[in-house]
Image (cartoon, rainbow, N blue to C red):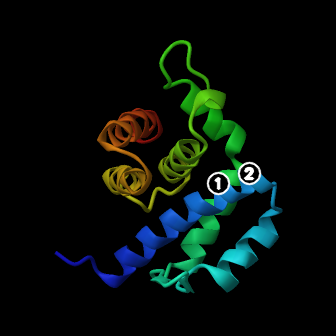
Amino acid sequence: MNKPARSRHRSAARLAAVQALYQRHMEKTATARLLDEFHQHRLGKEIEDDQYEEAEVDFFDDVVSGTIARQDEIDAALQGKLAQGWTIARLDKTMLQILRCGAYELLARADVPKATAISEYVDVAHAFFDEREAKFVNGILDAIGKDARD
C-alpha cells in the first residue's frame, strides 16, 4: 500500500530530523546553519546515488527546532521512562535522537495522532536498528504518549 504524498513527505521529514539532530549532537552545529544545510543539500536531493524523498520542510523545521528548544523537558520525560540504572547518556546517540523527536511530537504536536507519532518513529528505528530496539522505541514513546495525551 502506498502512502499518500503528505504522509511520505512527513515520514521523510522525521527521518531527516533524526539525522539533523544526530549531526548537531556530534558536530555542535548551530540550529540555523543545520536547517539551512538540510534545506540546501539533503531534503529531496540525490546523495551518493541515493534519491532522498521530498520532505515537508515546515514540519522538518518544527521537529528539529522544537526538539532543540524543549530538549531539557524531553530528556527529563525520557529519563523517567528508562529502566532503573539507565541514563540518557548511556543511550546510543541515534536512538536518543529518535526518542527525542518522537517525544517532541507527542508533547507538542497535538495535530499528530499519538499512534501515528509512535508508529513513525518505530519505522525510523527500523532504518537503523533491529526489532529489539524498535520495540524499545515503541515502549518508551507509548509511555511518554500516555503521560502527554491521556
In the image, taking residue 89 as reference, residue 144 lies left or right, namely left
Crowding around mark 1 (Cα neighbors within 10 Å: few <14, some 14 to 19, many 20+) is some
Between 42 and 78, which is closer to the camera in this rendering? 42
Q: Quadrant of the N terminus?
A: bottom left
Question: Residue 66: in sight, yes or no?
Answer: no
Q: Do the residues labelled 1 and 2 touch (CB within 8 Å)?
A: yes
Dot 2: within a 10 Å radius of its alpha carbon, few (fewer than 14), some, or many (20 or more) residues?
A: few
Q: Residue furthest top?
A: 84
**Amino acid bearing label 1:** Tyr
Tell me the tag on residue 26.
Answer: 2
Q: Mark 1 points at which residue?
A: 22
The extreme left residue here reads: 1
What amino acid is labelled 2 in the image?
Met
Residue 143, compared with residue 57, is above or below; it is above
111 relative to 59, above or below: above
Secondary structure under tag 1 reads helix
- Locate the C terminus and report the quarter of the image it occupies: top left
Which residue lies at the image location 49% right of the left edge and 64% below the top edge?
15
Q: Quadrant of residue 7?
A: bottom left
- Residue visible at 40% across and 54% down in the picture: 117
Name the secondary structure under disc 2: helix
